[in-house]
Amino acid sequence: MPNFLELGIKETWVSALKENGIAVPTPVQAETIPLALAERDVIARAKTGTGKTLAFLLPIMQKLDPGRPFPQALIIAPTRELALQITEEARKLARGTEIRILAVYGGQDVEKQLRKLEGGRHLIIGTPGRLNDHLRRGTLELGGVKTLVLDEADQMLHMGFLDEVETVIQALPYHRQTLLFSATMPAEVKRLASFYTRDAEDVTIKVEHSPVPLKSIRQLVVEVKDRTKQQALVSMIEMYRPYLAIIFCRTKRRASALNAALLEQGYESDELHGDLSQAKREQVMKRFREAKLQLLVATDVAARGLDVEGVTHVFNYDMPHEVDSYIHRIGRTGRAGGKGMAITLASPKDKGDLQRIEQGIQYIIERRRYEKDGAIVEARGPRPAEGRAPGRRKEQEGGRGGAAGSSRGGQSRSRREDKPARASSRKGDVRGGAKRGAPGGGKPGRGASQAQGRRGRGDASGRRGGRAGR
C-alpha cells in the first residue's frame, strides 16, 4: 500500500494527518486520491467506515487557494450530523492554514451563516435543504466552485433529497470535477451519477463477499414477543455490557418513549431524532462522543453517517424494512479495524424483513430466543453460518468472555451487584400494556430504577465484559 506522499499528498497535509494519528491510507483513499488530484470525476462505491471522508477532503484541501475569497469546493451531505462530522475533519486538517470553512445546515441561525458567507469561505459543507434556502435568497454564489462532492448519495435518495441535490448542482459551473460516494448504487443514484459526471472513473472497494464486514461485526438475532421486547433489550444490555451502544427505533415517538424507560431504570441514555433542536442534537452527540452517555436511542435519519469511536454494540430495537438500512445501522460499530456486535430484536411479524435482510447480506444470522425467565437460549431456525447446531444452550453472563464490566476502582458497575446481570421477570421490570406506551412494553417501577443505580459497562475494545469502563 503506497503512503500519502506517494499518492501525491504534499508534506504539509501529511504532517497534519500524522498529528491526528493517521499514517497509512485506506484502500478507498489509495484508489481515489490520485484520480481526484488528476481532476478526474470519480464514482466510488464503498461502505461507511472505510475512510471515504479523507479520500475527498485531502485532494480538495490541497487544491484550495486561500487567496481567492469565494467558495471553490462544495460538499453535500444528507444530514446535519454528517455535515458537521465532515466539517470537523476538514477543520482539523486546516488548522494553522488560512483556509476558511463553513457548515451550512438547517436548525442553525441563518443570519449567522450569512455573516460568515459575506466574510468569504473557501469550502462549503452543507445539507441540500439549507443550501437551496441560500440559493433562493441569493446569499450563496457557487460560480467559482471547481469541485463538487456528493457524500452518501444513496441516503439522499432514501431520504427524498435527490431533487434538491439536482437543484444545487444546476447552480454550479458546467466545467467542474464531481466526486460521488455511495455505499450502495440504486438505479436513481446511477442515473444521477451518469448525468452529472464526465468520463468518471469507477472505484469499488470490496472487503469481502458480504456487504457486511463479517470478521469485525458479530451479528445476532434475538427472537422476542412484542410485549417482552423492552425486557429483552434490558437483558441484552446487562448481558453484553456495551461501552457505547446505539439503539435504533423506527419512529421518533418510539425512540423518545424507549429512552424515557431506560433513563428511569438508571441507564446513562439519551435520544437523537428529528424533533430535537440543533443545539440539543449537538449537545447529545458531544456527550456520547465523550462517553458521558452509554446508550444513544436514535432513529435512522438522525443517525445517518455517524462516526463515533468506541461504539461496541448496535441494537436494532425495531427491525429495519430495507437491507441498506440494516447495513448502515450495524456499520456504526466494528469500524477502523475494531470489533463490534449487532443485535436485532425480531418479533414474529418481522420474519419477512429478516429473510430479505439475510438474502441481501448473503449471510444467515445466528439466532437466539428470549425466554420468559429472562434467559437467552439458542433458537431453532436457519442454521447459523458458524455451523452451530440449534439447541437450548444459555448464553453466559457478560457475553462470550463471561466477565463483568468494572468501574475505576475495580468494582462492578452493575445495577444489581448481588444478583445475575439479566432482566428476569421481577417486580419493577417493564410490563407490556403499561400507561407510558413505551415500545414493546410499559413503564418500569420507580422503586427499582433509582435504588438500583447505573448499569455495568464494558470497555471500548469491542469485548463484552472485560476491564473497566471509563
Image (tube, rainbow, N blue to C red):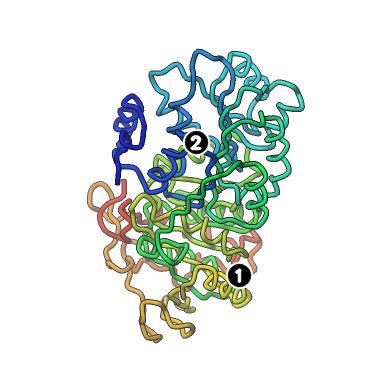
Image spot of residue 306 (x, y percent): 50, 46
- Identify the residue under disc 1: 432
In the picture, the disc for residue 86 is 2
Image point 55% across, 53% down: which residue? 259
Between 326 and 371, the one nearer to me in the picture? 326
Q: Specify whether 466 is left or right of 76.
A: left
Instruction: For mark 2, give the secondary structure.
Output: helix
Q: Quadrant of the C terminus?
A: top left
Q: Specify whether 382 is left or right of 417.
A: right
Image spot of residue 420 (x, y percent): 34, 69
Image spot of residue 312 (x, y percent): 38, 55
Image point 62% across, 33% down: which residue? 105
Q: Is residue 279 visible?
A: no
Name the residue furthest left: 410
Task: Classify 423 as above or below 456.
Answer: below
Q: Amino acid at mark 2?
A: Ile
Q: Amino acid at mark 1?
A: Gly
Instruction: For mark 1, give the secondary structure.
Output: loop
Image spot of residue 186 (x, y percent): 62, 57
Task: Mark 1: give few (<14), some (14-19) or many (20+) Cα within 10 Å.
Answer: many
Image point 47% across, 25% down: which residue? 63
